[in-house]
Image (cartoon, rainbow, N blue to C red):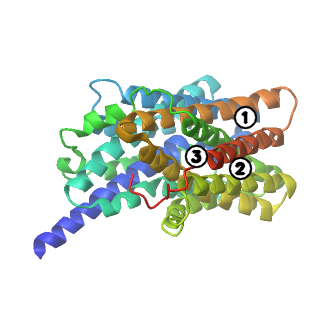
Amino acid sequence: MAYARTSSSTVFRIALQGLIALAVAMGIGRFAFTPQLPLMQADLGLSLTAGGWLAGANYLGYLAGAVLAGRRGACAAGLMRGGLWAVVASTAAMGVTDSLFLWLAMRFIAGVASAWVLVGTATVVLARLGQLGGQRFDGLVFSGVGAGIALAGLICWGGMLLGAGAVALWLALAGFALAGTVFALAGERASIRPNANADVAAKAVHSKAASAGTLVLCYGLFGFGYILPATYLPAQARLLFETPALFGWVWPLFGLAAALSTLAVAWLARWPRRHVWAGAQVLMALGIALPIAVPGLAGLAVAALCVGGTFMLITLLGLQEARAQAGANVRQRLAAMTTAFAIGQLAGPMAANALLASGLTLDVALWLGIAALLASSVLLVFTSFANTSIKEKP
């Protein structure tokens, strides 16, 4: 009985370390810039166009990091450790310089690092949980993405209410990343050491894959459509409300919805997976359109819930569908999906910048994202298989 309790405690601790690692990598390394954008505009004179380039640098870094993580000889545990420390360093550097060039470099490094942590954590932590019979905690590990987004948003919101500027908040976020990194890497070395096949799996998942056709295209369109509101929601809120108490809550709400959204998967198991994926994208598109059609507090709240509450669900459904349809080529298909998503989310801010530079408004870019999501949904419905459901084991 004592062994069972010890084993249970160890499994939970490992899962919690994985959750914190993803919270640091994604909540800060990938998405902390989003709630910081309105403050950097107000305090440091950052333009919306420059903000788009900073977001694009991070997404380009993420794509580069995923490619590097799949190279021969990469060590999953090393990727996890190195990536976490790089997130800490690049986040702190955002608060000690005002050079746009250096900001671009730091956001690129943070993107590379977050991809490394994602690959490393998925390989090391999930492998360790499997060894200890703790697969039921896999979902807890990945709830770290939404939890990190929510916590980073709360740090920025709280700082704004206290009158803290963008520089102070970058340093506060770096402090949170440092604390999270120390916790995620603490304890027995065995808790972050994969089995002999783990690194091989990581490299295979991220190796170059042949085109997977419509499914990959749909996932890429999702990446393009989702990244626009994910990048600009707080900036939209600031255009409507100058008071931080009013516009600062948008990103924490987004993250909370993301953290809770995967609970809906079991309830949705009765319908074909591609249909649910398509429906979730329609709901996301509706959420993006609401603040445009109905500017105000209610529209922004619904947008945060619709986008935040669907993007992790769609991610899960897309990868499940890829695994279910790939047969013997599962790893190649997942690599193709990941690449398409990374390209889509990189293209989003670049398209927004091009439209803003030509004199058009951010709303036009958001409508383009809505069109991408709806196109993806139509393709999914018309190519769906009636016998493919969420509850099928991939």
* Residue 39 appearing in the image: no
Question: Residue at (18%, 65%) from the top-left corner?
Answer: 7
Q: Nearer the viewer, residue 242 or 125?
A: 125
Query: Would you say 336 lies left or right of 225 here?
Result: left
- Quadrant containing the N terminus is bottom left
How far is disc 1 from disc 3 in space, using C-alphas?
Answer: 16 Å
In this view, the residue farthest toward the bottom is 1
Verify CB contact (< 8 Å) between mark 2 and mark 1: no
Question: Which one is nearer the viewer's eye here, 51 or 269?
Answer: 269
Q: Quick one: label 3, few (<14), some, or many (20+) residues within 10 Å? A: some
Residue 385 — which label?
none
Q: Tell me where residue 100 appears, x and y as whole percent.
A: 64, 26
Instruction: Judge depth for marks 3 and 2 and give the one in front.
Output: 2
Instruction: Identify residue type, mark 2.
Output: Leu
Q: Which residue is mark 1?
A: 46
Question: Does residue 236 appear left or right of residue 256 in this picture?
Answer: right
The CA distance from mark 3 to mark 2 is: 22 Å
